[in-house]
Structures are given as C-alpha cells and as structure tokens.
Image (cartoon, rainbow, N blue to C red):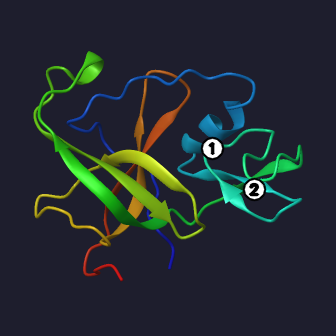
C-alpha cells in the first residue's frame, strides 16, 4: 500500500526549524520529498534512529540511510497542556513514542487525531514544512485500523 507522504498544509502545531549539520543533511533533505529515512548498519543489519555515520548498536562505521515505510504503532503517548519555547502558546497537543515497523522508536507528535489515540494504534508518517530546508516527521492514525 502506497502512503500519501506528501508535505501537508501548515498544521496547528509550530514547525521549528531543526539544526542541520553535515551528518543530518541527507535525512532532512529527504523529508522535503516526503521520505522518512532511517539509519541502517550494513555490519549488523539493524535500523536505528536518528541517522548518523556510527551505528549505535554495534559501533561500526558502516551506517547508511534506508527509506522507512513510515508505518508504526503508538508505544506511549501523553497530552501536553503547557508547552515551552515555540510551543508555549500552543493549545493541548499530543506527544508520543512511535515504534516503526523497521524497529526504531521515535519521539514525535501525533496529529489529525480528533477521536484520540491509544497505545498500539497504527500510525503513518506525515511531514510539516519548516522555515529551513526540512520538514518535521509527525504521525497520524491510520484510518480504519487498530493496533496489535
């Protein structure tokens, strides 16, 4: 199943620009194309997040990028009522750990969830543009599906 991973319209949440350096530039460039990239170690065969040249699992310098399907399940979540920095004036929003099908777990926002969210609900990635050459990967419920 092909997901609509396009960059959607400006969300109600702020979209702070990330810090982009030489190690993260390819990851952030891919987000502008609606692609979520994960680190992948050719030595141990494991995916990881955040992408970087050194595998955090085995210590090898054989890391590369691989595209994620952008599907996962909610591992844990909370509603934030009093944000800080760019989020200080934002109303309640959802923050969650999402475990991707490939294995890594990301801390992210859950969006487009008027009916709420639950642990093990299926989610898919969406991207929200920032002022930089980057888009923030966030997740929304997969409609019509419940988690495991």
Q: Position of residue 27 (x, y in %)?
A: 65, 40
Relative to 114, residue 73 above or below: below
Q: Is residue 7 visible?
A: no
Name the image quarter holding residue 117.
bottom left
Which residue is more in the foreground, 110 or 148? 148
Which residue: 72% across, 46% down?
56
Please state the horizontal and vertical placement of residue 42, each as a whole percent of the image.
87, 59
Front-most of 48 and 32?
A: 48
Residue 40 bears which disc, if any? 2
Asked whether the viewer can see residue 69, the reply is: yes
Mark 2: few/some/many CA within 10 Å (<14, 14-19, 20+):
many
Residue 49 locus on image (x, y percent): 61, 48
Q: Is residue 140 left or right of residue 131?
A: left
In the rendered image, which quarter is residue 89 located in? top left
Quick one: SS at disc 2? strand
Pointers 2 and 1 in contact (C-beta within 8 Å) = no
Question: In the rendered view, does 106 fall on the left or right side of 80?
Answer: right
Residue at x 80% of width, y 39% of height: 53
Q: Which residue is mark 1?
A: 30
């Amino acid at each position: 199943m092909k997901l609509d991973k396009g960059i959607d319209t400006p969300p109600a949440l702020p979209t702070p620009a990330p810090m982009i350096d030489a190690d993260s530039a390819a990851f952030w460039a891919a987000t502008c194309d609606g692609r979520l990239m994960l680190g992948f170690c050719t030595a141990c065969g494991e995916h990881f997040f955040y992408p970087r040249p050194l595998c955090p699992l085995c210590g090898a310098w054989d890391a590369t990028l691989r595209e994620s399907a952008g599907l996962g399940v909610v591992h844990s979540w909370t509603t934030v009522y009093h944000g800080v920095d760019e989020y200080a004036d934002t109303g309640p929003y959802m923050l969650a750990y999402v475990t991707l099908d490939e294995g890594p777990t990301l801390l992210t926002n859950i969006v487009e969830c008027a009916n709420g969210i639950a642990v093990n609900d299926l989610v898919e990635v969406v991207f929200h543009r920032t002022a930089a050459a980057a888009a923030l990967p966030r997740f929304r419920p997969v409609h019509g599906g419940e988690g495991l």
